[in-house]
Amino acid sequence: MADHTPRPQADAGGTGGQRRQLLRRAAGQEATVLVLMPVAVLVVIILGSIAVDLSMAYAGTRRVADLAAAWANDAASAVDPASHYRDGQPILLDTETAVAWVDQRCQQADRLDPGIQLDCAKTLVATDGAQVTVTVTGDVSLLFLDAFPAIGAPRRVSASSTAALITLD
């Protein structure tokens, strides 16, 4: 009768046992890759949405700064008619006209740019003789972070610009 009991095989340098052990370890790590890939994709999507929102906030800041510069340049053209015709006296800015002009432009710009909500009550116009400073404040809406009320509040941005009345003598 033949004996069919398995006999231990001699290992040449122990490589066969190490190979089986490595194969067992590799087979158990397949599930780790299946879990890590969706997590990695989710992290990339979240970082991308944060980058988009930060770029929107930066673009809103630039837009508010551009508005302040344009309004200051235009408000500097509000010359006081009485000072314009006096000989030997410096030409001064008309503060009331400059304030009314900037307020009117603020009301119009609020409707034209839906991503920025300008706070016209906080738009300041200060004149100092032949110089005008316009400060514009607004809230920039974010796209993705608005879903999280704790961190997704609109970003408050402010910009200031000064323009001077230059007379050619």
Image (tube, grey):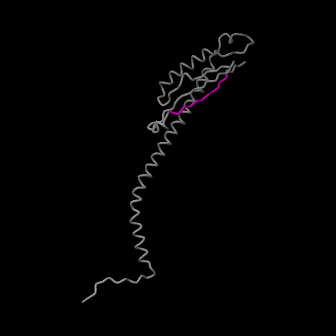
Can you say whether 27 is above or below 141 in the image?
Answer: below
**Quadrant into which the N terminus falls:** bottom left
20 falls in the magenta region? no
- Furthest residue to the left? 1
Residue 68: which quarter of the image?
A: top right
Percent across and percent down for residue 136 are: 57, 26
Vertical position of residue 2 compared to residue 137: above or below: below
Extreme residue toward the bottom, this view: 1
- Image location of residue 128, percent across then percent down: 68, 19
Q: Nearer the viewer, residue 167 or 90?
A: 90
Q: Quadrant of the C terminus?
A: top right
Q: Which residues are magenta?
A: 154-164
Q: Position of residue 62 (x, y in %)?
A: 56, 33
User: Percent from the top left, x then y, of residue 104?
Assistant: 53, 18
Q: Main secondary structure of the magenta part?
A: strand
Q: Residue at x 45, y 46 (%)?
A: 45
Which residue: 53% across, 36% down? 57
Q: Which corner quadrant of the image does residue 9 belong to?
A: bottom left
Residue depicted at 57% across the width and 16% down the height: 100
Residue located at (40% from left, 55% from top): 35
Q: Tell whether 61 sits left or right of 82.
A: left
How many numbered discs? 0
Tell me: residue 94, above or below residue 142. above
